[in-house]
Amino acid sequence: MKEENLKVSQKALIQACKNLGVKYSLIHRDKILVKVELDPPLFFLHHYKAFNREDLVRISNDKDLQYSLLADRINIPDWKSYLDPNCNPKFRHIAEFNSIKKIADDISENFNFPIVVKRNKGSQGNHVFLCKDLQYIRKSLRKIFDTRSKHYDYIAIAQDFITIKSEYRVIGYKGNVLLNYEKDNKDADYQGNLSPLHWKGAKARLISDESLNKRIQDFIKPVFQVLPINFSGFDIAVDSDDKFWLIEINNSPGLSYFEKDNGVNEIVKMYEFILQDLINDQNERRSEENC
């Protein structure tokens, strides 16, 4: 079967299936959909993972909802969301402000510079701006609310800036840390994208420090009491005082940067762990049905 059209995560998933003897198939003429033959079957398209409920996927794709659910459970930089004053007319009555100027003024009055302004449903650092003055807040909002742009969002978020000492991408499954890597940009060059791995020369550095992984696992534990998402990527920042901060959650974290710097073996092991857990659940259900 052709696998050249598959993403890194799909290829690693297939290797995990082979290692565990789990049947799979490639669907579509371009072989872009992986079907894992469990009960029920799981489907993996591109970088999307099939481990989460749809309602939890929607929440984890919405930063404003994430923060609203989790702010009283875990350390998150203070934020405020703003509706596009020129959004669909049927929603404009709920907008707090009727112009970008008024939104920018409110942001500058409620946050200390520098201020992070970003789109609500963005990923990969797209439309994330570090604003050092009022003029740049206005410019950032105009970009986020530009309906001609593929990165348009009808909600913008302003957020406290955290002085970050280290930033990690943590892959969690049912509360367990399966993979952790530092977004190391210490010797990299800024290329216009604040996301650390988008800097030229940045590295995804595997973290095998069990004590650090345990601290992070304890830090994110409260998330699962409110948001019982099975599989997710957590962006965790550590500030200059060694305090942990949750930046955001991604239900379909990309793995290409990690694979480039570390190979695929750790990703395969991650999928083996998850598949074995699903197999155990499947066998347990069948045993109960046969009782």
Image (tube, rainbow, N blue to C red):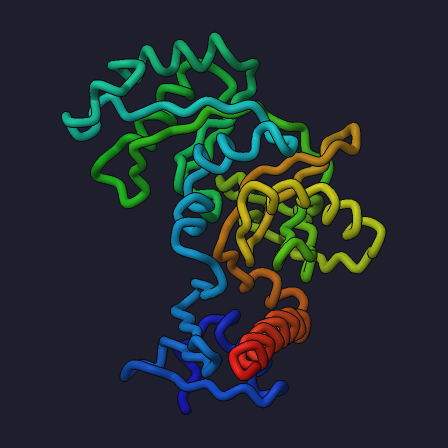
Task: Please name whichever residue, 29 or 220, is drawn nearer the observer in this view of the structure.
Answer: 220
Residue 58, percent from left and from top: 39, 47
**Residue farthest front in this picture:** 291
Residue 252, percent from left and from top: 48, 57
Task: Please name whichever residue, 143 or 276, is drawn nearer the observer in this view of the structure.
Answer: 276
Task: Please name whichever residue, 174 or 156, is drawn nearer the observer in this view of the structure.
Answer: 174
Relative height, residue 65 to residue 278 (above, below): above
Q: Is residue 12 visible in this depiction of the protein? A: no
Task: Please name whichever residue, 269 or 197, is drawn nearer the observer in this view of the structure.
Answer: 269
Q: Residue at x 55, y 16 (%)?
A: 113
Q: Is residue 240 visible in this depiction of the protein? A: yes
Q: Residue at x 57, y 60 (%)?
A: 257
Q: Is residue 266 left or right of residue 21?
A: right
Q: Residue at x 56, y 34 (%)?
A: 70
Q: Residue at x 33, y 11 (%)?
A: 102
**Residue farthest left in this picture:** 89
Residue 233, percent from left and from top: 57, 52
Q: Give the position of the N terminus as an image quadrant.
A: bottom left
Q: Is residue 200 left or right of residue 94?
A: right
The quadrant where residue 27 appears: bottom left
Residue 234, percent from left and from top: 60, 48
